[in-house]
Amino acid sequence: MPNEPEAVLESVVQMTGQRQLDSLAESLVSTVKQMVNAEQVEIFKIDNDLELEDVVENVIKQGFQVSYGALLECLRSRSTVRLSTQVFEQIAIPILLKDVVVMVLWVTSEHLSEQDSQMLKGFSKVYENFLSIVIESETDPLTGLLNRKAFLPRLTKVAKQIKQEAIDYVLDPASSDLSAKRYWLCIFDIDKFKVINDTFGHLYGDEILIDLVKVMKATFNELDSLFRFGGDEFVVILSKREKAAMLNLCESFSHKLSIHHGREVKVTISMGIIEINSIEEPSELLVKADKALYYIKETGRDRVGLYEDLVADGSIIPLKIEDDIELFQ
């Protein structure tokens, strides 16, 4: 039986062995599917900047088969909600951090026993407790963005996805789509940030960083991964977009930041971008994007530069990396 004590213990061991947010969530879903005869297992991320009704509507718009009332009640009460019909049973279990619902585990099955329900609650609590540990290790304390440690696993995952999409296209071109949309890696920093810190103090500098992150979150979507590498250095892994749309988005972000803090400082950024591929190592991609950034900073700042375009027009010499580069310690 899958819910024998040995199997349950092994599932907990596997779950708590994860060290990245994505793999931790995947482990919870996999564990639930193994332990319960479920037709549907989902983890919904909750955007607490939205009204609860809007959160539920967004979930339904994505095509998930959930009960509006049950999910809404789970969010409002911050407690487990069960729904039974003649056809199936559903359970919504909130995942809380600092007493705020950040996710909901949703399970649909033909039958959920009381033992199943208690086991699901137990797995959710284990996930909840371990989630706080992983988040602390993967996020920047000032801005709440992902940190440098979290970067490599996410970029590696994107590269694997690109490779798989190419394989799928070769095997079955009719059912696969290799469109003009690509994944992109962007690195940027604030122009003359050291001067700002030296002139107005580090507290004022931190205020600028926090404001910048607010604009980042308002500009990029939930499929984009946002990182702070340290100081005023930020990285974004952009989800699939066509080149023109990507450049428009990045330039729009840069424009939004061109605002005055008080009467003293105008905040601008310089950004280097490269298309992500499955051939080059993550370190190579980051170094090349950084080379584009360096060129932008050396030739005027306050602009966006795409590595491939800068190489094509002769602005920079193609970078050849022969030795391994360690960037993620």
Image (cartoon, rainbow, N blue to C red):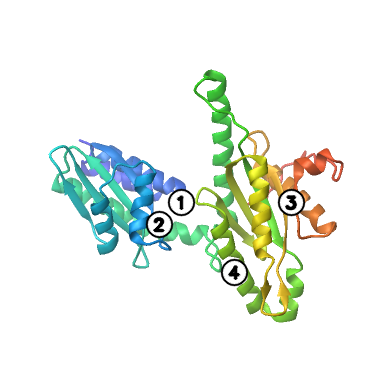
Residue picked out by circle 3: 290
Closer to us: mark 4 or mark 1? 4
Q: Quadrant of residue 125?
A: bottom left
Indicate which disc, 3 or 2, sits on the residue closer to the N terminus. Answer: 2
Name the residue rendered at 58%, 27% in the picture: 166
CA distance for labels 3 and 4: 23 Å
Secondary structure under badge 3? helix
At label 4, counting other C-alpha atoms closer than 10 Å, the crowd grade (few under 14, some 14-19, many 20 or more) is some
User: Does 251 sit left or right of 170 as displayed?
Assistant: right
Q: Which residue is mark 1?
A: 21
Q: Is residue 268 left or right of residue 133?
A: right
- Label 4 secondary element: helix
Sequence-wise first label, 2 or 4:
2
Give how far apart the Cα atoms at labels 4 and 1 are.
Answer: 25 Å
Where does label 2 land, which residue? 131
- Inspect this view and state whether residue 9 appears: yes
**Counting other residues with Cα less than 10 Å from the Cα at mark 2, is it few (<14), some (14-19), or many (20 or more)?**
many
Q: Position of residue 255 (x, y in %)?
A: 68, 60
Instruction: Please report whichever mark, 1 or 3, sits nearer to the chain's N-terminal start.
Output: 1
Quarter of the image where the N terminus is located? top left
User: Which residue is the site of mark 4?
Assistant: 211
Q: Please tell me which residue is depicted at 72% across the width and 79% down the height of the picture.
A: 264
